[in-house]
């Protein structure tokens, strides 16, 4: 769902909703969602820009990918 809202594919583009859906998936160790969440934090889309949070979620995505 996050990707649909991020890209506007079939729905109106909404970074706030994309952020919410990515966060839900990221919290259960979905690496693709963690990577997209890092991007949203890096760009400040749907959330405040935070390089610290971007780095955190990118690192978590890398750890999740190693476990899968």
Image: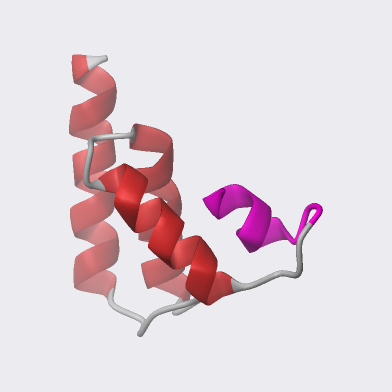
In reply to whether residue 62 is colored magenta, the answer given is no
Picture coordinates of residue 33, whole percent (x, y)? 41, 44
**Colour style of the rendered protein structure:** secondary structure
**Apparent side of residue 65 relative to residue 39 in the rendered image (left or right):** left
Q: Main SS of the magenta segment?
A: helix
Mark count? 0
Picture coordinates of residue 29, whole percent (x, y)? 24, 35
Q: In this view, does 12 lie above or below 49?
A: above
At horizontal 22% and vertical 29% (from top left) the residue drawn is 64
Q: Which of 17 and 48 is in front in this view?
A: 17
In this view, the residue farthest toward the top is: 68
**Apparent side of residue 53 relative to residue 5 in the rendered image (left or right):** left
Q: Nearer the viewer, residue 29 or 44?
A: 29
At horizontal 22% and vertical 19% (from top left) the residue drawn is 66
Q: In this view, does 5 lie above or below 1?
A: below
In this view, the residue farthest toward the right is: 10
Q: Is residue 50 above or below residue 58?
A: below
Picture coordinates of residue 60, whole percent (x, y)? 20, 42
Please report the bounds of the magenta region as a residue range. Answer: 1-10
| Location of the C terminus (image quadrant) | top left
């Amino acid at each position: 769902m996050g990707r649909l809202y991020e890209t506007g594919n079939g729905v109106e583009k909404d970074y706030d909703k994309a952020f919410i859906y990515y966060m839900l998936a990221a919290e259960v160790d979905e690496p693709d969602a963690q990577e997209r969440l890092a991007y949203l934090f890096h760009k400040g889309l749907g959330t405040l820009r935070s390089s610290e949070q971007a780095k955190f979620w990118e690192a978590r995505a890398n750890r999740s990918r190693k476990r899968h």
